[in-house]
Amino acid sequence: MTWNRKDILDIASLSVDEIQLILNTADGLKEISQRPIKKVPILRGKTVVLFFHEPSTRTRISFDVAAKRLSADSISISASASSLVKGETLVDTAKNLEAMNPDVIVIRHSSAGTPYLLAKRISTSIINAGDGMHAHPTQALLDMMTVREKKGELKGLNIAIVGDISHSRVARSNIAGFTKMGAKVRIAGPPTMIPVGIESLGATVFNDMDEAIDGADVIMMLRIQKERQQRFLFPSEREYASRYGLTLSRIKDSKPDVMIMHPGPLNRGVEISPEAADYVNSVILDQVTNGVALRMALLYLLAGGMRHADDH
Amino acid sequence: MQMIIKGGHVLDPGHMDAVTDIFIEDGRISALKEPESKPSGDNMSDNIPGDEKQTDRIIDATGCIVVPGLIDMHVHLREPGEEYKETIETGIKAAAAGGFTSICCMPNTNPVNDNRQVTEYIIRTAAQFQSVKVHPVAGISKGLKGQELSEYGELKAAGAVALSDDGFPVSDSQLMRRALEYSKGVGLKVISHCEQFDLSGGVMNEGAVATRLGLSGIPNAAESIMVARDIALSDFTGIAVHIAHVSTKESVCAIRDAKKRGVPVTAETAPHYFTLTDEAVGEYNTNMKMNPPLRSAKDKKAIQDGLADGTIDMIVTDHAPHSIVEKEVEFDKAANGIIGLETSLSLGLKLVEDGVISFEMLIKKMSKNPARFFGLSNDITNGSAADLTIIDPNRAWTYDVKSGYSKSKNSPFDGWEFTGRAVFTIVNGRVVFEI
């Protein structure tokens, strides 16, 4: 297939073929990071702007490393260091960035939908690196890459996602992605953290974690944010850990080859016990490694000439 | 100064329903006559009583419906304070184009209309345009802060026609109770914006669409809880309360039940609530963001049912102009509200076309019921002020927001094709809009 997409805004709008192309491309590029000299000239002379409005370590560095391994120039700006603190609107800031002719703008923002706003107003390729509670497509793609790598294919797998589904863009994008690729997604968490109508995205809801992980091929734990306690979503970390935390005994009660995933950062002892996080079946660090390859693939597809060759 | 509106079907629900010629003199209706069929060979030209030379204008309303002037009792005019969004002048022009002869403007201006000076300023400014009548609604509480009562007596004397903290709920139930009681003594009614802040705080309707878009939700209960409270206070005090911009099924049910029990509650909704659902938010379209938010299909149906069975008495626009500065931003940050004066009647006519309500009911909800709420008479009868709207029910038109009269362009209905609209708006016998 040919690639002719300008932006990566969410998973829902990607086709199965496009997802497969992205994952295959990432598989191919992964090896570069294992070389003694981890750099290829594919994106030499290209500029990638990392426009992060929300604190991020893993995702921002992952994009930065991905850009550099492909020889692109990457520039990182944050909200506090940009004109946004001087009252400039997001659209104006983006138009100014566009005027400097970057090839890709990677945006993370606390408000859902901002990547759409930019994609409509500027011609530069946009990659959504997480928008509010809405979507985190690159995380979902790297998760799919990781599962596919270990399990061979995604079709027919049972994926259990456990935790604060309401506030999780990772959960939303993974539900969209895994179901699109033929896997079944079960979600579990306290009812206060299960958003209305999540079934319409294709997930099956469980309030009991043990039921959700029973027979699952993959257990994906989500980070629990302490400040949610103030909004009456759960009574204490202690109670949360006992009802919805992943422990060794819960792992032992599930399938022997169950994969343990977590998008990070971990709250060891809350949603995942230290032993569970370091368990032999945990792929939490593989997710990070694959994240670089996956983001290299996206930068390559968006800026690497394939699109421009196909464009008129 | 004489005007004749000829050949129109005059429909004044409860009073008149016939093809009638309306004679207007010095701003008032001077005669209503059955049109005489032209006798053949008669030399008299048009059978007009009196001296025809004095007639300044004859409007041919053949094929049109002449109704009592439409009244929009829920409008934000933004002046004073936010003239870059709308002024009294541009708001009046938009209202006239929408067929409204009277509008009521909400007090959330800057400064807030909680005092004589602002009320008088609005009335004085509006009067100079000799167009659509503007009736200020003043704050229930000082500064709309929900802490102290405004001076209702002075506001009434200055010309305020009702009280509302619109945009903000009266969270304090004791203040609401006292506002109802005190306002009764003054002779002003209270309009309640029902929203429980502990539950609201989202940016769109709570439901599957918000979940998919990752936007924080406002549950139906945030509205219906306070509707239930206000009904309880109205029931307990025996004093009328009016529920603003009803958007949920649960509110409709609560109001329907209260009316059955004889509680003196009235209610309004806006065209977007019976026309659109939260699906319209699409890819974060900020022109679909308002408070209360667009709800589910089930709620939309309940609003339509409430209009049909009389639970909802009025259709208002909640015309809320915002500039591109407030709208072309992140959805979370975008201001709540849409403009509506120029599309309200046509959206109402769509309801008629769809068989939800009759044309007569539409006119009741957009004219007669608001008039009655404020104790005004707008009957089409000899001697009454000639505030009339002439509707061509078959006129096809396309709404182009850019060529609209409102200073702001935040409409969800840009590009919509309609059948039927106001073709003349007449206030005190003056044509203030015609197309």
Image: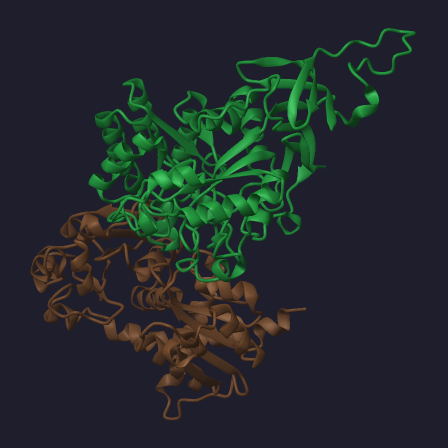
Chain colours: A brown, B green
Q: Name the image quarter holding residue B119.
A: top left
Q: Residue furthest bottom?
A: A37
Please say if A145 is above or below B242. below
Q: Would you say B58 lies left or right of B177 here?
A: right
Q: Would you say B217 lies left or right of A84 here?
A: left
Can see residue B140? yes
Q: Position of residue A25 (x, y in %)?
A: 46, 72
Please say if B133 is above or below B89. above
Please say if A307 is above or below B389. below
Q: Position of residue B203 (x, y in %)?
A: 37, 52
Most foreground residue, B49 or B145: B49
Most foreground residue, B160 or B154: B154
Q: Position of residue A283 (x, y in %)?
A: 24, 71
Can see residue A3? no
- Quick one: quadrant of the N terminus of chain B? top right
Q: Name the image quarter holding residue B127.
A: top right
Q: Would you say A178 lies left or right of B400 here?
A: left
How many numbered markers are drawn? 0
Residue in the picture at 49% in, 57% down: B82
Residue in the picture at 53% in, 14% down: B14
Q: Would you say B152 lies left or right of B426 here?
A: left
Q: Name the image quarter holding residue B97.
A: top right
Residue in the picture at 52% in, 65% down: A119
Q: Position of residue B414 (x, y in %)?
A: 60, 47
